[in-house]
Amino acid sequence: MKKLTLATTLALLSPFAAADTILGVYAGAGQWQGEYSGNAGDPSIDVKSLGMDEEDNNYYYIALEHPVPIIPNIKLQKMDITSEQTATIDQTFTIDGTTFVAGTEVASDFDLSHMDIVLYYELLDNWVNLDVGLNIRKFDGHVTAVSEFTAESVELDEAIPMIYAKAQFDLPLTGFSVGLEGNAINYEDNRLTDYSAKLQYMFDSALDIGLEVGYREMSLEVDEDVTADIQLKGPYAALLFHF
């Protein structure tokens, strides 16, 4: 027992981070009801003029936490974000040099789906949990617009490094916890932020199963092949597992 206590104490005092004393696997699946706002193109058009409004977006994740302080924990998350709409536009806009004229019908396809690869350390691991690290967000999508006379499609296949942080506060003896999670990067004329606030409840059972509800907001501002300033925000719910 003394040896175990000493080993645990050394891990907690590590300059890198605190770590779980046992191997832990965390997984979840949920749906985010996001509402679009903002504009796209140069000259730009309000995304609501393209018919974009609320969409249900599915996501899945798995995280592995281990007792080795120097090696970061890892989390993989797949997020599907798509919107396919057709609308008669009320203003002229341009995507990557291709112009779509006001009064024409345009079919738009926005795909902001991505994979997050998060490497993080646990700085605190008790009733107050604090994780910090690096998130590599790999987009695998596109922006497409098609009218009767013109069409344009721009691939989104960038890998973007982001600062990652998560804070969670457990309410002792209740099964409830509240938390904040965020990813952010700002460089040149581009900015990407992704924040969520959450309430979680874990059932008292042999297999740790829980529910999570919260509010998430993602903001994307780019000035490259596609000029856009788009926000997506709304509530979400997820089913959680801990092995």
Image (spheres, rainbow, N blue to C red):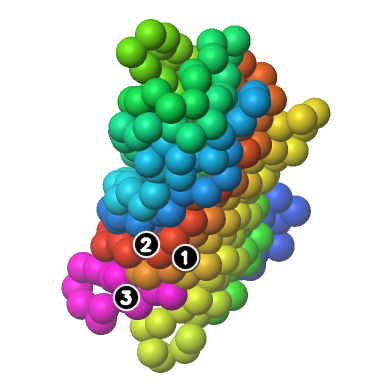
Magenta segment, principal secondary structure? strand
Neighbourhood count class around disc 1 (C-alpha, 10 Å): few under 14, some 14–19, many 20 upward = some
Q: Please provide percent x and percent y for residue 155.
A: 47, 16
Q: Quadrant of the C terminus?
A: bottom left
Residue range in magenta is: 199-211
> Which residue is identified by label 1?
215
Write the residue at 75% across / 53% down. Answer: 15
Q: Residue at x 31, y 61 (%)?
A: 238
* Label 2 crowd (10 A; few <14 / some 14-19 / many >=20): many
Of discs 2 and 3, which sits in the foreground?
A: 2
**First reached walking from the N terminus: tag 1 or tag 3:** 3
List the single residue furthest toward the right: 188
Compared to 52, does 41 lie above or below? above
Residue 84 placement (x, y as % from top left): 31, 33
Q: Are marks 1 and 2 in contact (CB under 8 Å)?
A: yes
Counting the numbered discs, the total is: 3
| Residue type pointed to by label 2 | Tyr
Regarding mark 1 in the picture, which secondary structure is present there?
strand
Kind of element beneath mark 2: strand
Q: Amino acid at mark 3?
A: Met
- The numbered mark at residue 17 is none
Do residues under tags 2 and 3 come within 8 Å of each other at their CB atoms? no
| Residue 66 horizontal/vertical position (percent) | 46, 50
Q: Compute the Cα span from label 1 to label 3.
A: 19 Å
Residue 236 tag number: 2
**Residue 72 % position (x, y):** 57, 43
Mark 2 or 3, nearer chain start? 3
* Of the image marks 1 and 2, the number of the one nearer the N terminus: 1
Q: Is residue 153 above or below residue 229?
A: above
Q: Is residue 200 magenta?
A: yes
